[in-house]
């Protein structure tokens, strides 16, 4: 599929498909996000396509992704998002979630 950007009015946060498009109800496009938002979880958890790992904060892998300490984080957390060396040099750390040592409540 090709979208002609010259004839389409598209910007960050705009819908990608017109309501009468065959893709409108098939492909999900998140609205109201901006380039300032970190990478979305859906990028990393895509089931149909495996995207290359990129930095959670900037979406790039320039300067390489941080590998030091990631194995230790993965032992403690279920999810460890990638971090590039540039964002690390700016003081950012790997985004983590789902601690492994937390007991989950059973709902009965």
Image (cartoon, rainbow, N blue to C red):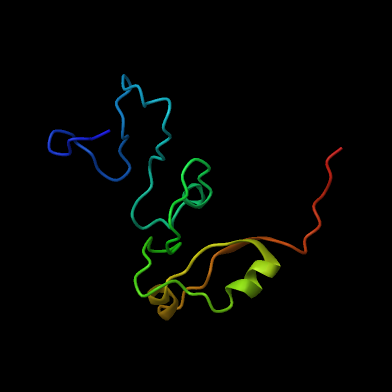
Looking at the image, the residue that sits furthest to the left is 6
Residue at 73%, 62% in the rendered image:
100
Looking at the image, the residue that sits furthest to the right is 108
Q: Residue 104: horizontal and vertical position, in percent?
A: 80, 52
Residue at 38%, 60% in the rendered image:
59
Question: Where 67 sits versus 19, above or below?
Answer: below
Is residue 72 toward the left or the right of residue 31 in the image?
A: right
Looking at the image, the residue that sits furthest to the top is 20
Question: Where 90 sits versus 75, above or below?
Answer: below
Is residue 90 toward the left or the right of residue 42 in the image?
A: left
Question: Where 40 sits versus 94, above or below?
Answer: above
> Would you identify the image quadrant in which residue 98 lies?
bottom right
Question: Where 101 sits versus 40, above or below?
Answer: below
Q: Residue 23: horizontal and vertical position, in percent?
A: 36, 26
> Would you identify the image quadrant in which residue 32 lies?
top left
Q: Quadrant of the C terminus?
A: top right
Q: Residue 1: horizontal and vertical position, in percent?
A: 28, 33
Residue at 42%, 71% in the rendered image:
84
9 or 43: nearer the viewer: 43
Is residue 87 toward the left or the right of residue 104 in the image?
A: left
Q: Residue 39: horizontal and vertical position, in percent?
A: 44, 55
């Amino acid at each position: 599929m090709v979208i002609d950007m010259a004839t389409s009015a598209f910007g960050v946060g705009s819908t990608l498909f017109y309501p009468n498009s065959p893709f409108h109800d098939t492909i999900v496009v998140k609205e109201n996000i901006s380039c300032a938002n970190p990478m979305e979880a859906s990028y990393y958890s895509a089931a149909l396509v495996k995207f290359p790992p990129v930095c959670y904060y900037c979406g790039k892998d320039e300067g390489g992704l941080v590998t030091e300490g990631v194995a230790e984080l993965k032992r403690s957390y279920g999810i460890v998002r990638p971090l590039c060396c540039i964002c690390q040099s700016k003081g950012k750390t790997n985004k983590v979630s789902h601690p492994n040592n937390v007991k989950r409540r059973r709902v009965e």
